[in-house]
Amino acid sequence: MTALYEATDPELCAAPVEAREAPAPEPERAPGRVGVVLVSHSRDVAASTAALARALTGTPSPAPVAGAGGLPDGSVGTSAELVRAAVTGVDEGAGVVVLCDMGSAVLTVKALLTDGSLSPADVRIADAPFVEGAVTAVVTASAGGDLATVLAATDDARTYRKL
Protein backbone atom coordinates (compact mmCIF):
# COMPACT_ATOMS: atom_id res chain seq x y z
CA MET A 1 0.00 0.00 0.00
CA THR A 2 1.27 3.46 -0.84
CA ALA A 3 1.20 6.09 1.89
CA LEU A 4 0.15 9.62 1.03
CA TYR A 5 0.86 12.62 3.20
CA GLU A 6 -1.48 15.51 3.75
CA ALA A 7 0.55 18.59 2.77
CA THR A 8 -1.81 21.25 4.11
CA ASP A 9 -1.53 20.41 7.85
CA PRO A 10 2.06 20.26 9.25
CA GLU A 11 1.00 17.95 12.11
CA LEU A 12 -0.35 15.42 9.64
CA CYS A 13 2.66 15.54 7.34
CA ALA A 14 4.27 12.62 9.19
CA ALA A 15 1.08 10.59 9.42
CA PRO A 16 0.28 8.36 6.46
CA VAL A 17 -3.13 8.57 4.89
CA GLU A 18 -4.30 5.35 3.23
CA ALA A 19 -4.21 5.54 -0.52
CA ARG A 20 -7.61 5.19 -2.00
CA GLU A 21 -7.65 3.92 -5.53
CA ALA A 22 -10.46 4.84 -7.83
CA PRO A 23 -12.68 1.85 -8.54
CA ALA A 24 -11.59 -0.02 -11.63
CA PRO A 25 -13.94 0.37 -14.56
CA GLU A 26 -16.14 -2.63 -15.15
CA PRO A 27 -14.64 -4.81 -17.85
CA GLU A 28 -16.71 -5.32 -20.96
CA ARG A 29 -18.79 -8.41 -20.59
CA ALA A 30 -17.37 -11.09 -22.83
CA PRO A 31 -19.92 -12.96 -24.88
CA GLY A 32 -21.01 -16.29 -23.52
CA ARG A 33 -21.02 -19.54 -25.41
CA VAL A 34 -22.44 -20.27 -28.81
CA GLY A 35 -26.08 -21.34 -28.57
CA VAL A 36 -27.62 -24.21 -30.53
CA VAL A 37 -31.19 -24.45 -31.84
CA LEU A 38 -32.64 -27.70 -33.18
CA VAL A 39 -35.47 -27.16 -35.66
CA SER A 40 -37.51 -30.28 -36.26
CA HIS A 41 -40.96 -31.05 -37.54
CA SER A 42 -41.56 -32.89 -34.25
CA ARG A 43 -41.48 -31.37 -30.77
CA ASP A 44 -40.42 -34.76 -29.34
CA VAL A 45 -37.55 -35.21 -31.82
CA ALA A 46 -36.20 -31.70 -31.10
CA ALA A 47 -36.49 -32.12 -27.32
CA SER A 48 -34.98 -35.63 -27.29
CA THR A 49 -32.08 -34.62 -29.51
CA ALA A 50 -31.37 -31.60 -27.30
CA ALA A 51 -31.42 -33.84 -24.20
CA LEU A 52 -29.06 -36.34 -25.85
CA ALA A 53 -26.63 -33.60 -26.89
CA ARG A 54 -26.64 -32.10 -23.37
CA ALA A 55 -26.05 -35.52 -21.80
CA LEU A 56 -23.10 -36.25 -24.07
CA THR A 57 -21.20 -33.04 -23.23
CA GLY A 58 -19.83 -34.53 -20.03
CA THR A 59 -20.31 -31.26 -18.18
CA PRO A 60 -22.94 -30.18 -15.67
CA SER A 61 -23.23 -26.85 -17.47
CA PRO A 62 -23.51 -27.45 -21.23
CA ALA A 63 -23.86 -24.68 -23.78
CA PRO A 64 -27.41 -23.44 -24.25
CA VAL A 65 -29.45 -25.64 -26.57
CA ALA A 66 -33.16 -25.46 -27.37
CA GLY A 67 -35.55 -27.32 -29.54
CA ALA A 68 -37.98 -25.59 -31.86
CA GLY A 69 -40.03 -28.58 -32.84
CA GLY A 70 -43.46 -28.88 -34.31
CA LEU A 71 -46.15 -26.25 -34.30
CA PRO A 72 -47.26 -24.28 -31.22
CA ASP A 73 -50.25 -26.62 -30.77
CA GLY A 74 -47.91 -29.65 -30.70
CA SER A 75 -48.76 -30.91 -34.17
CA VAL A 76 -46.18 -31.77 -36.82
CA GLY A 77 -44.65 -28.88 -38.78
CA THR A 78 -42.25 -25.98 -38.34
CA SER A 79 -42.99 -22.67 -36.68
CA ALA A 80 -41.23 -19.37 -37.24
CA GLU A 81 -42.54 -18.23 -33.85
CA LEU A 82 -40.91 -21.19 -32.06
CA VAL A 83 -37.64 -20.74 -33.97
CA ARG A 84 -37.45 -17.04 -33.05
CA ALA A 85 -38.14 -17.81 -29.39
CA ALA A 86 -35.53 -20.60 -29.32
CA VAL A 87 -32.85 -18.42 -30.91
CA THR A 88 -33.55 -15.62 -28.44
CA GLY A 89 -33.50 -18.10 -25.55
CA VAL A 90 -30.05 -19.54 -26.33
CA ASP A 91 -28.33 -16.35 -27.50
CA GLU A 92 -25.51 -15.45 -25.09
CA GLY A 93 -23.90 -13.02 -27.53
CA ALA A 94 -21.48 -15.45 -29.24
CA GLY A 95 -23.81 -16.49 -32.05
CA VAL A 96 -26.31 -19.25 -32.62
CA VAL A 97 -25.98 -22.38 -34.76
CA VAL A 98 -29.24 -23.79 -36.11
CA LEU A 99 -29.63 -27.41 -37.20
CA CYS A 100 -32.67 -28.45 -39.20
CA ASP A 101 -34.13 -31.92 -39.66
CA MET A 102 -35.24 -31.48 -43.29
CA GLY A 103 -36.12 -29.12 -46.12
CA SER A 104 -39.04 -27.04 -44.90
CA ALA A 105 -37.34 -26.48 -41.55
CA VAL A 106 -34.42 -24.99 -43.49
CA LEU A 107 -36.85 -22.85 -45.51
CA THR A 108 -38.44 -21.54 -42.30
CA VAL A 109 -35.07 -20.49 -40.87
CA LYS A 110 -33.93 -18.99 -44.20
CA ALA A 111 -37.16 -16.95 -44.37
CA LEU A 112 -36.47 -15.57 -40.87
CA LEU A 113 -32.91 -14.67 -41.87
CA THR A 114 -34.15 -13.00 -45.07
CA ASP A 115 -36.90 -10.94 -43.45
CA GLY A 116 -34.59 -9.70 -40.68
CA SER A 117 -36.30 -11.59 -37.84
CA LEU A 118 -32.94 -13.22 -37.11
CA SER A 119 -29.57 -11.51 -37.51
CA PRO A 120 -27.63 -13.31 -40.26
CA ALA A 121 -24.29 -12.26 -38.73
CA ASP A 122 -25.07 -14.04 -35.48
CA VAL A 123 -27.28 -16.94 -36.64
CA ARG A 124 -25.98 -19.64 -38.96
CA ILE A 125 -27.58 -22.76 -40.39
CA ALA A 126 -25.32 -25.80 -40.11
CA ASP A 127 -25.24 -28.16 -43.08
CA ALA A 128 -25.03 -31.33 -41.02
CA PRO A 129 -27.03 -34.42 -40.10
CA PHE A 130 -29.49 -33.57 -37.36
CA VAL A 131 -28.42 -35.83 -34.48
CA GLU A 132 -24.68 -36.02 -35.17
CA GLY A 133 -24.55 -32.30 -35.91
CA ALA A 134 -26.50 -31.43 -32.78
CA VAL A 135 -24.23 -33.47 -30.52
CA THR A 136 -21.08 -32.11 -32.16
CA ALA A 137 -22.34 -28.51 -31.99
CA VAL A 138 -23.34 -28.68 -28.32
CA VAL A 139 -20.15 -30.48 -27.26
CA THR A 140 -17.96 -28.00 -29.15
CA ALA A 141 -19.88 -24.96 -27.87
CA SER A 142 -19.75 -26.34 -24.32
CA ALA A 143 -15.96 -26.60 -24.62
CA GLY A 144 -15.86 -22.88 -25.49
CA GLY A 145 -15.65 -23.07 -29.27
CA ASP A 146 -16.51 -19.88 -31.12
CA LEU A 147 -19.09 -19.70 -33.89
CA ALA A 148 -16.63 -20.66 -36.66
CA THR A 149 -15.31 -23.60 -34.64
CA VAL A 150 -18.79 -24.90 -33.87
CA LEU A 151 -19.75 -24.68 -37.55
CA ALA A 152 -16.54 -26.45 -38.58
CA ALA A 153 -17.30 -29.23 -36.11
CA THR A 154 -20.77 -29.69 -37.60
CA ASP A 155 -19.18 -29.86 -41.07
CA ASP A 156 -17.01 -32.72 -39.79
CA ALA A 157 -20.13 -34.47 -38.48
CA ARG A 158 -21.39 -34.63 -42.07
CA THR A 159 -18.50 -36.94 -42.97
CA TYR A 160 -18.83 -39.41 -40.07
CA ARG A 161 -18.78 -42.96 -41.39
CA LYS A 162 -20.73 -45.67 -39.65
CA LEU A 163 -19.03 -48.62 -41.34
Image (tube, rainbow, N blue to C red):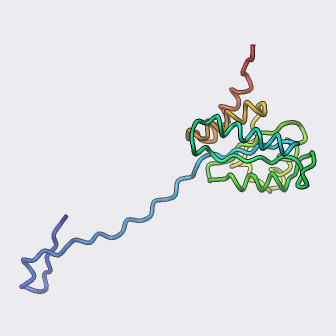
Which one is in front, 80 or 138? Answer: 138
The answer to whether 75 appears left or right of 2 in the picture is right
> Could you tell me residue 123's position as x and y percent?
72, 47
> Could you tell me residue 17's position as x and y percent?
17, 75
Q: Residue at x 75, y 17 (%)?
A: 162
Pick out the residue farthest to the top.
Answer: 163
The answer to whether 135 appears left or right of 78 in the picture is left
Relative to 62, say whether 5 is above or below. Answer: below
> Could you tell me residue 9's position as x and y percent?
11, 86
Q: Residue at x 57, y 52 (%)?
A: 31
The answer to whether 122 appears left or right of 129 in the picture is left
Total label count?
A: 0
Which one is in front, 55 or 11? Answer: 55
- State which quarter of the image contains the C terminus: top right
> Could you tell me residue 147's position as x and y percent?
63, 41
- Residue 100 placement: quadrant: top right
The answer to whether 30 appears left or right of 67 in the picture is left
- State which quarter of the image contains the N terminus: bottom left
